[in-house]
Amino acid sequence: MNLKTKYLGLDLKNPLVPSASPLSRNLDSMKRLEDAGASAIVMYSLFEEEIAHESEELDHYLHYGTESYAEALSYFPKAEEYNLEPDAYIELLRKAKESLSIPVIPSLNGITTGGWIKYARHFEEAGADALELNVYYIPTDNRLTSHDVEERYLNVLSAVRDSVGLPIAVKLSPYFSSFSHFAEGLVGAGANGLVMFNRFYQPDIDIEEREVLPGVDLSDSAAIKLPMRWIAILYGRVKASLAATSGVHTAEDVIKLLMAGADVTMMCSALLQHGPAHIQKVLADVTKWMEDHEYESVEQMKGSMSQRSVADPSAFERANYVKALNRFKILQ
């Protein structure tokens, strides 16, 4: 049974890839993911805000009060010359590349074209196999147009693309006016892959304390429907690798997404709930299903239920809405 797939130009032994999560915050955990069968690992995200905050904080304490002595300022290098927390991330990446036999993909998370982008080059120097660029952005300014929002993504991508030769995957939200057109624009700006979709963690309200609370709600298998639909639509239309994320819990989820056209399926919530060993179970279940249904390879399955392959392409568009409502039966 051939489970091999290709993602971002990388040859992977199977389509199961742990997405960015706390499970990649230390080397031992990453080794457990590899031992369980992961074909590559996306590291936890390094955030633009973390880089900026630590640089500013260190700079403040180094220079606080130094104006009291005329020569004191010259004793200290600039903040960007110090080894900050981001350097621990790079060191973890370097150790992972030395210890693991599978590709390691760092994740860079930001929304501006500032100096944080230089860390993409540091990742490349540390041996990264590719880079995931996560532009986690919620536009709240009502003066911003849809064009402004898209330009922000494209500008960040272009700045990173100019700094590295690594394959770049862009992790996206689904909230664009014309997603197919925007996907084409990202590929034109240098994206080698598209990761669909980012789940925005929604805040909650504590009605007693009257505070806005952060929160993380783990996904379930129902969440695969949104990425599955768009992967099926984009398959064969954009010249980029397609990764599915959100709701990948079971072998059935993996099979559906591969049939839609995904090159890889990324897991987070399922691994946080069940641990790294869950990868081994899903792989075994995928293999059994393929044997039972006489599939010899993942490539044979890939895209077989994409929009351009199915008998009724409109099922992925408005027709699905009409049929779903007409078939729904009200419970008495």
Image (cartoon, grey):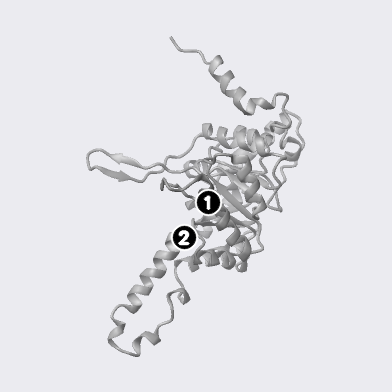
Task: Name the residue tied to disc 2.
Answer: 48
Determine if residue 1 is in view: no
Q: Is residue 235 left or right of residue 245?
A: right
Which of the pair 235/305 is nearer the observer?
235
Question: How busy is the neighbourhood of tag 1: few (under 14 within 10 Å), some, or many (20 plus)?
Answer: many
Query: Which part of the image, by quadrant, shows the N terminus?
Result: top right
- Give the percent coordinates (x, y) of residue 3: 71, 42
In the image, residue 123 sits, relative to residue 157, either above or below, namely below
Place residue 62 in its image quadrant.
Answer: bottom left
- Residue 307 image position (x, y, % from top left): 69, 31
Image coordinates for residue 86, horizontal then vertical, percent = 48, 66
Could you classify mark 2 by the number of other residues whose Cα lies within 10 Å: few (under 14), some (14-19), or many (20 or more)?
many
Which SS class for mark 2?
helix
- Is residue 212 visible in the rendered structure shown here? yes
Alpha carbon separation for disc pair 2 and 1:
15 Å
Q: Position of residue 13 (x, y in %)?
A: 70, 48
Q: Are marks 2 and 1 in contact (CB under 8 Å)?
A: no
Q: Which residue is label 1 attached to? A: 20
In the image, residue 317 above or below residue 284: above
Work out which quarter of the rendered image holds the C terminus and state it. Answer: top left
Q: Secondary structure at mark 1?
A: loop
Residue 227 lies, with reference to residue 101, above or below; the image says above
Q: Nearer the viewer, residue 99 or 92?
A: 92
* Residue at the far top in the pictured view: 332
